[in-house]
Image (cartoon, rainbow, N blue to C red):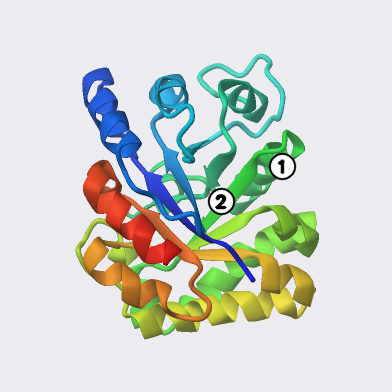
Amino acid sequence: MRRTMVAGNWKMHGTRASVAELINGLRHLALPSGADIAVFPPCLHITQVVDGLKGKSIQVGAQNSAVEAMQGALTGEIAPSQLVDAGCSYVLVGHSERRQMMGERDGTLNRKFAAAQACGLIPVLCIGETLEQRESGKTLEVVSRQLGSIIEELGVGAFAKAVIAYEPVWAIGTGLTATPQQAQDVHAAIRAQLAAENSDVAQGVRLLYGGSVKAANAVELFGMPDIDGGLIGGASLNADEFGAICRAAGN
Ligand code: 13P
């Protein structure tokens, strides 16, 4: 039985003051014991969040990390080992905003994924198609290629200690959510691709859905058999809304 997970990606939002307010809101939440909860603040605020959430069962992750595991001469980057030292447990790899706006390609993402795991961080691999790709019937091909890149480079066993987030690009920040059935179809295909290599890994890995998840649609999405929780953007900046989504995953 897979434990559900809800992850809040704060993206490039927050000041020290607004982060303090959000931490306060999160500390007051009634969280379900049946789900793992994590938040991904901007790097600048990670230590503030780790300190502020001490004693609360919310893990902290980073939104990005370097291609090298250990600290060294790599200006402007943050090593996975430094994130572990700061108290992180997870890191996002390959969010579509980084693929599209920062030009991150599969080769780079394979290195980031491996470097993170080398330090004991759990990578959350983000995959998903654009609207154009969906409309031209290429959804499964795109998602399978993004997933296949890691499998080919690192082996399917890499997913024994990783999470996958399916985030259709057209549903991110748009208010357009994939229907539960649309998301389920892609999640089932992701699990089948893993199962073709190793069924234990496929059954154990958590597949999160991301893209305009709110408290109002979370129960239906998380009710699908291959959806094990969510990666939440905008709604994770509101503690009460985020708490309601967490409870949808935990009950
Ligand atoms: P929204 O929930 O704001 O659509 O963002 C989803 C996302 O990109 C999470 O990583």
Disc 1 marks which amino acid? Gln
Q: Quadrant of the N terminus?
A: bottom right
**Taking the image as drawn, is residue 138 in sight?**
no
The residue singled out by tag 2 in the image is 124
Look at the numbered disc 1 and give the secondary structure of its residue. Answer: helix
Look at the numbered disc 2 and give the secondary structure of its residue. Answer: strand
Is the C-beta of the residue carrying label 2 under 8 Å from the nearest atom of ligand 1?
no
Disc 2 marks which amino acid? Val
Q: x and y percent of residue 5 in the render?
A: 49, 57
Q: Residues within 10 Å of mark 2 (few under 14, many from 20)?
A: many
Identify whether 153 is placed above or below 142: above
Q: Quadrant of residue 204?
A: bottom right
Identify whether 18 is placed above or below 113: above
Which residue lies at the image location 26% right of the left edge and 36% below the top edge?
Answer: 25
Point out which mark residue 117 bears. 1
80 lies left or right of 181:
right
Q: Quadrant of the C terminus?
A: bottom left
**Taking the image as drawn, is residue 154 in sight?**
yes
97 lies left or right of 244:
right
Q: x and y percent of residue 62 in the render?
A: 49, 35
222 lies left or right of 69:
left
